Image (tube, rainbow, N blue to C red):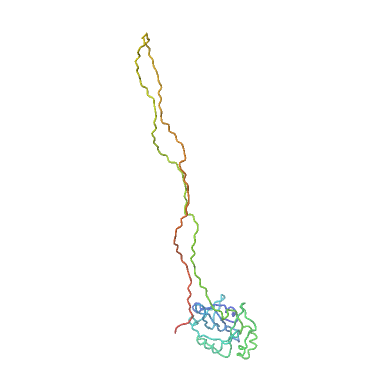
Amino acid sequence: MIGQAQLAQLHDATVYDSAGEKIGGVKQVFVDDATGDPVVASVHTGFFGMSESFVPVHDGDLSDDGRVRLSVDKDKVRDAPRLEPSGDGDDVHLSNEQLGELYAYYNLPYGGGRRGYDRADMQDTGQPMAGQNTAQGRAEVPGTEAQDAAMAGMAGSVAGGAADTDSPEVTRYEEQLHVGTERVESGRVRLRKYVVTENVTKTVPVRHEEVRVERVPVEGTAGGEHEFTDETIEATTYAERPVVETEAVPVEKVRLEKDVRTTDQEVTGEVRHEEIDVDDGRRES
């Protein structure tokens, strides 16, 4: 059961049906002028919450996290009679006839009588505004002046929610693909110098001396006595031979230069976007 003490919490509550399926958020709460207990609430239904359905809430279950669990199903609430409360401003009222029609639709017992059912609004603080009992609510409950004084702030008081004239809206978002470049290391190039040994063959002219014997006759010389002896004459001969030596000389320079080349590359990415469907809560008969 939802009582007077839970009125402030009820205004910001979310309504769920008997199967736990979300119906919508509470828009207006109507209280009993005599007891101050919540009796009926209007609930935003439809995709945008643009529809408003009325449902009895006094026998619902309100949890601490702001969830109202009702004993009816979601479709029953969405197809409920569209009631038009009378009055304006802070004095918005449901008649006994309207309550009887609503209770009959939900197959709930309705005591009737001349009791009044005023809308209870809240300030932004979520607390009832004292002294807001409406004259209409008091007139329909004869002999309850003392009760009305004790219940000041319940019947016809304001429970802060969005104004009825507010237009519900929803913002649609989409993702956009932004493509850029970043500089990353793609590789490294080293200049490495190493020694290679190879055989080189070259022809070099070399000279050498040779000895030949040349005999020349002696003429016109008188002969005399000659002492015969052994005699050896030596002659030194010379020859050239190749001499190999190496010398390191610079032959070339190798430079490492970098060029920038621009190429086209295709990239593909996934982006998400939101679509909006409108469900006005109406059903075809």
Of residue 49 and residue 98, the one placed in the foreground of this image is 49
Of the 4 image quadrants, the one containing the N terminus is bottom right
Quadrant of residue 164 in the image? bottom right
In the image, 155 versus 182, the foreground residue is 182
Q: How many marks?
A: 0
Task: Identify the residue at the far front of this view.
Answer: 220
Residue 268, image x, y percentages: 45, 64
Residue 272 percent across, percent down from the top left: 47, 69
Horizontal relation, residue 25 to residue 199: left or right: right
Q: Quadrant of the C terminus?
A: bottom left
Residue 195: quarter of image:
top left
Q: Nearer the viewer, residue 94 or 263?
A: 263
Q: Is residue 68 shown above or below 220? A: below
Q: Position of residue 92 (x, y in %)?
A: 58, 85
Q: Is residue 103 above or below residue 246?
A: below
Question: Based on the displayed image, in which of its 4 quarters is residue 266 positioned?
Answer: bottom left
